[in-house]
Amino acid sequence: MSKPKVIVTRKWPAEVEAQLTALYDVQLNENDIPMTADELKQALQSADAVLPTVTDAMTADILNVEGKRAKIIGNFGVGYNNIDISAAKEQGLVVTNTPHVLTDCTADIAILLLLMSARRASEGERLIRNQQWTGWKPTQLLGQKVTGKTLGLIGFGRIAQAMAKKAHHGFGMKILFYAPSQPAQPVIDDLQAVRCDTVEELLSAANFVSLHCPGGEATRHLINEQRLQLMQPSAHLINTARGDVVDSKALVKALTEGWIAGAGLDVFEGEPNIDPGLLALNNVALLPHLGSATEETRTAMGNRVLANIAAFFAGEEPADRVV
Ligand code: DGY
């Protein structure tokens, strides 16, 4: 029997690509140049499985292409707002993602950004790199203490809970959260976490606010001008979720006018393009979407996709089926 044809849209860790090559008739993307909409359509027409990632916008137009051969989209990533899920559903396509394996690394990046923003780490490094540091001063680059402060999490899924654990048990932080569903009681007890009834209540009470909701229309600009105005002037906003959860124009205004002290961002509206207003500011720490970027995690993500498509081709239910 011939091997299923699989198309991978971007370069993946070598170990996973080797396994894909051994198991399937695979088309890799050696040059790592993002595929165009037409190339993605052709991929759906010519392969049994297409394996995209966060940088591939699998729009309704692409998913609705005539003459599809593909039956499964194995997304490399836990977030799947790059895929028009209702179009995929209508087209009878199975979609899978890669949960669990990136939880700790993404929570680590959220903690890193929290510390960078609170302690003005980017500003400090710039001072040294620009050879402008003239020595220690009692009042230089004073930031905010993190230990013992209050962390508010918007969204309280796996990554938020992992961050809360590190913040509470590592830095003695008090935990507030806002989430549509009720977390398990042992999780709340372990973190002594307090639920807020509204986003507004959380924003005004927290010293640090970290975003952990999915991207997409429902959460677009959840953090807007009005809500930023509710935060404390010494507060920091951390975003490792999706860029469009924050209205970047409003954030630039908040950081410029001192409504909040700082922000730490790993994701951006319209990335990889960054709002020039953010680039011009000193009080924002910027990372290029590194949440899951460790060797261990990216390999584990690839292996998770492998397991999902292997189950599908064996006629079984993939563990991480989204639709
Ligand atoms: C995800 O998995 O959703 C990340 O943002 C991409 O690594």
Image: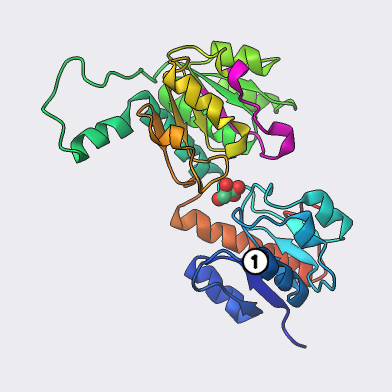
Q: 213 and 250: which one is in front?
A: 250
Name which quarter of the figure residue 185 lies in. top right
In the displayed structure, 119 sits above or below 316; it is above
How are the colours assigned in the image?
Answer: rainbow
Q: Is residue 211 magenta?
A: yes
Q: Residue at x 67, y 58 (%)?
A: 75
Q: Is residue 212 left or right of residue 260?
A: right
* Residue linked to disc 1: 306
* Residue 194 visible in the picture: no
The location of residue 167, given as percent across then percent down, is: 47, 27
In the displayed structure, 101 sits above or below 265; it is below
Ligand 1 within 8 angstroms of badge 1 C-beta: no
Name which quarter of the figure residue 303 lies in. bottom right
Q: 246 and 241: which one is in front?
A: 246
* Image: magenta residue range: 209-227
* Residue 187 visible in the picture: yes
> Dot 1, crowdedness within 10 Å: few (<14), some or many (≥20)?
many
Which residue is outermost to the left?
134
Q: Is residue 82 magenta?
A: no
Which residue is outermost to the front?
276
Pick the quarter of the image with the N terminus.
Answer: bottom right
